[in-house]
Amino acid sequence: MSQPVLMLPDEAATQAFGERLVLALPETSLIYLYGDLGAGKTTLARALIRALGHEGAVRSPTYTLIEPYELAGRRLYHLDLYRLGSPEELEDIGLRDLLAEPATLLVEWPEKGQGVLPPADLELRLEPAGVGRRLSLHPATARGAKILKNLGFSS
Ligand code: ADP
Ligand code: MG
């Protein structure tokens, strides 16, 4: 499967990608956001959530671990697992139920849930590139490949 790379020269480019991504997502999708602190994971998630019609602030789930949304007739969960003590704690936030729902899951720091989190449909990795960011997209399922196709990347 192709693994496209995009250059995001500034914050506006990250936001524009979030807006573009939301249009490409099927109702159920599992998206993992990789990258160091400050890479732009929350920036991307916020733009996507706003593009679905959320008004006002988009809270970072840094302390709550999860923020639920019901927007434009779809369910979306934004997770930030940075402060997860162990992958087993995912049971406490009801991961199993979330995965059984038709919903979009956007997960920052999926590394922290390794062993309990299932494979993503699409992995996004943000890395510094000059003053901007480099975004690489790794589809891991047929659904992930479909998302890339919807984004206009050929396989
Ligand atoms: P993370 O959630 O990965 O820790 P944040 O989204 O909270 O990162 O913060 C990213 C920071 O980088 C913000 O200050 C944002 O303005 C900035 N930023 C986001 N995307 C870009 C980009 N493409 N180029 C330069 N700066 C960016
Ligand atoms: Mg973040």
Image (spheres, grey):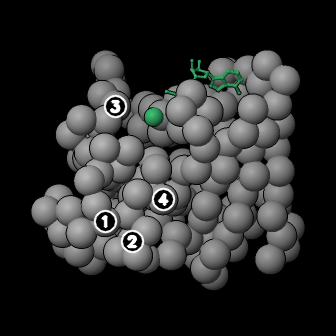
Q: From mark 1 to mark 3, how far is it between C-alphas?
A: 20 Å
Q: From mark 2 to mark 4, how far is it between C-alphas?
A: 9 Å
Q: Which SS class for mark 3? A: loop
| Rendered location of residue 108, percent (x, y) | 45, 48
Answer with mark 2 or mark 3, whichever residue precedes in sequence. 3
Task: List the residue tagged with mark 3.
Answer: 60
Q: Find residue 76 and name its label.
A: none
Answer with mark 1 or mark 2, whichever residue precedes in sequence. 1
Mark 3 residue CB less than 8 A from any atom of ligand 2? yes
Q: From mark 4 to mark 1, how far is it between C-alphas?
A: 9 Å
Q: Residue at x 35, y 49 (%)?
A: 81
Task: List the residue tagged with mark 2.
Answer: 117
Q: Which SS class for mark 1? A: helix
Answer with mark 1 or mark 3, whichever residue precedes in sequence. 3
Answer with mark 4 or mark 1, whichever residue precedes in sequence. 1
Q: Are marks 1 and 2 in contact (CB under 8 Å)?
A: yes
Residue type beneath disc 2 = Leu
| Rendered location of residue 68, percent (x, y) | 24, 47
Among the 4 quarters of the image, the one containing residue 144: bottom right
Q: Find residue 111 and name its label.
A: 4
Residue type beneath disc 1 = Pro
Answer with mark 2 or mark 4, whichever residue precedes in sequence. 4
Q: From mark 2 to mark 3, how far is it between C-alphas?
A: 20 Å
Label 4 Cα crowd, 10 Å radius (few <14 / some 14-19 / many 20+):
some
Quarter of the image with the N terminus is bottom right
Residue type beneath disc 4 = Glu
Q: Find residue 87 and name its label.
A: 1
Image depth: mark 2 or mark 4 in front: 4
Residue in front for this viewpoint, 116 or 142: 116
Q: Residue at x 38, y 44 (%)?
A: 82
